[in-house]
Structures are given as C-alpha cells and as structure tokens.
Image: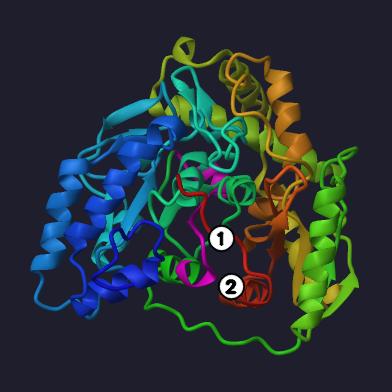
Amino acid sequence: MDNATTTWVGATAKQIARAVRRGDVSATQIVADHLEQISVTDPSLEAFRTVRAGEAIVEAEKVDEQDDLANLPLAGVPVAVKENTPVAGLATSQGAAVRSAVAEEDHEVVRRLRGAGAVVVGTTRMPELGLWGTTDGPDGATRNPWDLDRTPGGSSGGAAAAVAAGLVPIAHGTDGLGSVRIPAACCGLIGLKPGSGVIPRELGVDGWFGLVEHGILATTVADAALGFSVLAGGRPAKLVEPGRLRVGVSLRSPVLGVRPDVPNREAVSVAARLLGGAGHDTVTADPVYPTALNLAGLATWFAAAYREAEGTGVDPQTLQPRTRRHVRLGRWAWRRGYVRQEQRDGWRARSIRFFAEHRVDLLLTPALAGPPPAADGHTGARWGRNVLTNLRYAPYAAPWNVAGLPAIVVPVGVRPDGLPLAVQLVGPPDSELLLLAVAGQFEMRNPWRRHVLA
C-alpha cells in the first residue's frame, strides 16, 4: 500500500505496522480510517460493546510522537479486546447484564498489545458469562458478516465479526471451550488457542478452572503469528517451514450422536489433500473420547458459570433465564464435587499419549459439525435448546481446553450456502508455532477470502 491509498481498512496488521514504522502513514490516520469503518458498519453487526473513538485517536497520536518505532511490532495497528478482559477506563463486562467496576489498569495481555504499539479501539461483545456458542443478548445479537442472519459464533463472536468485516485487522479473544476457534470457523478466520501456561491467564475467578486461554483472531497466518508472539510476551516469531509430518485425521465427534455434515467432512478431505501436497503423511487416528470426559466437561461448564456469577456478585435475577438455570446446575455440580482436577489431569495425560501411541505430530479434525446457527432467538429460548444448539454444531473444540493443548482453526473453503468452511489442527504441548507453520502451508496452497467488507 502507498500514500495514494484512500483507506487502510482491509490491510493486514503486518502491512500497517510496517508502513507506520517507515513513516509512510501515521498511526492517527490508520486508526481514523478504522473508526470510520466501525461507525458505518458496526450498527448492522453489533460487534463492539464499547468504541473508544476519542481515546483511540489520542493514543494513536502518542504512537506517532515516539522517536523510535523500530521496536514496535504492532505500531499503529488498531486492535479490539474482548469485553471480559480489563481495559483501563472501561467497565469489564461478562455480557450485557454482568458488569464490574471500571478497570483501573489494563490486563497484562492488553499491556503487551499496547507495549507493541497497538491502539485499542474498543471492546467486543460476548454472550452472558461467555457460556454460549452464539453472541446474543437482550440488547441485540452480533451478526456474521458473511450472512447477517447467522451468528458469528461465541463466545468471542464480537471479535470474530469485527475482524471478518475489516473493522480491525486482528482481535483478542478468550477460549474456554472453543470460544476463539468456533467464531473463527464461523467467520472464515485463523483462530489460535495456545496451550496452558503460554499466556498469562488472570481472568475471572480462576479462568474456568484453568480452561480459558487468551487467543488471537486474524485473517492471515502471519498476523496470527504476530499477535500470538505479542500476547506471549516474546519477539515476533519467524515461522519455519516444517519438515515431513505425520498427521492423524479424525471425523469422530466428542459428543455421542453428533456427526459432521457433508460440507464439514469434505473440509477435512480438502485439508488432508493440502497436507499431502505439502509433503506430509496423513493417517486415520481417532482419539477415544470417554463418556467421563463429556460428563466432566459439562460439570465444569456448569460450575464455571456458578463460580463466575458468584465471583462478580451479580444478582441471579438479573441474568437471562438460560443463564440462571446454568448457574443453578453449576452450584449443584460444584457442591457435590463433580468438578475434579484429577479428571482434567487424566484427560490431559491421555491426550498427550495419543500423539505418541499413534506416532502422529498433529491431529486434524472438523472445526464445526454444521453451519453457524441463526443470529437471533437464543436469549429467550429454553436452556435445553441452547445447550443442544451448542453441542450439535460445535462439539470439536472443548476437549482440547480440558487437555490444555494448543489448537488452531484454519479456513479451507466455502459451504454450498456461501458460509466459510474450516478445520481444526491440534498439537502436543508447545506446538503453537508448528500449528501456525502448517496453517501457513494451507494458506499458500489454498488462499481464502480474508474479509467481507461493506
């Protein structure tokens, strides 16, 4: 891009940062362009909870005033932060009705983003307590830029919608049972959930018993790698072309009775062919998802809601009916001791052994089992309907939170209905850069549409 460019909306984070460091464009202009796009597009998407228009311009001007931009990998890059993560000066929200006091300081991941030169333009919407795979509430529904009648997923649905619509080039999200990867799949993005301990968690009561991780949503692998490096507190990583890998391929669903539809099965076939074209070997390798894992996962999901509601001091009567029932079930599961660390530790050990026993470096699965559900109609629906909606369309992400293993979602095409298709890659501990490198091979051989710009 050059000085003749009329807008920087749609540029990658790497392109923006390089241009700002060179002096080709000011951070102030970059941020102004994106704020204008937000003002035009977000009323129909409802991706943002809060837009920091004036504050973001002031912060962009401060970036421009710095004498040395060479060490700012995100110089002038507009970013969005999920509303459950403290941003100084803003109320930290857990969805529409659950808000805490105004944060006095940034969360560590926000400090890292700003320290890298990024400008926080706002916070993005999530469903109440982050519980659902759809991002809606009594004050409206966040919509998928690919089809406004569909959800962008959840719980980082606002983040995914913002990136897919070009409102920001990258966005922060959190992933407790798939909340970065599910929206990435719904919106045709790269969505990375790192493994346990890679990025400081410090979220909520105890980060959903340690299941939640901070992650990144982006339109390119390079941007995802850049964002991940910043969140992890390191210098931007250079991805290395991987040697010949052996990749396990599995369509098996973690949820009994739920199977991937034809487009999602075909997505895995496409991904397997891409892996073969990149010189890797693929073999069928099905993880064994024990019934106890599903029961433990459900109990943890319920109890996490109870603990978060208790921790925020929210009046249960102010919660949505579906959330109230979830919290009640969580109180029951917690008090009866159904949430046990040894269950999570056992699944983690079993998951790590899977790679050794099958002699595979990575695991390839569908990202979703079906298309993104409708954007509307979930807030007022019965609790059971919400649970079934989540389990039926997005069963593949949650086990890897319980195991604490890194996982990434990568676009691979488009459904017959025009919505994106994606697959999930899972790796053993400390394989984040390998996952990104393999995703880069997908991107090179099968480029995807990066945005749905208005």
Q: Which residue is mark 2?
A: 436
Residue 233 to residue 340: above or below: below
User: Helix, strand, or loop for circle 2?
Assistant: helix
Residue found at x 40% / y 24%: 98
- Is residue 9 shown left or right of residue 57? right
Contact flag, marks 1 and 2 (Cβ < 8 Å): yes
The residue segment tinted magenta is 205-223
- Tag 2 or tag 1, which sits nearer the N-term? 1
Farthest residue to the top: give it. Answer: 317
Which quarter of the figure is the C terminus placed in? Answer: top left
Q: Which residue is mark 1?
A: 192
Farthest residue to the bottom: give it. Answer: 243
Residue 11 to residue 135: above or below: below
Report x, y in % for residue 184.
59, 51
Residue 262 to residue 280: above or below: above
Tag 1: amino acid: Leu
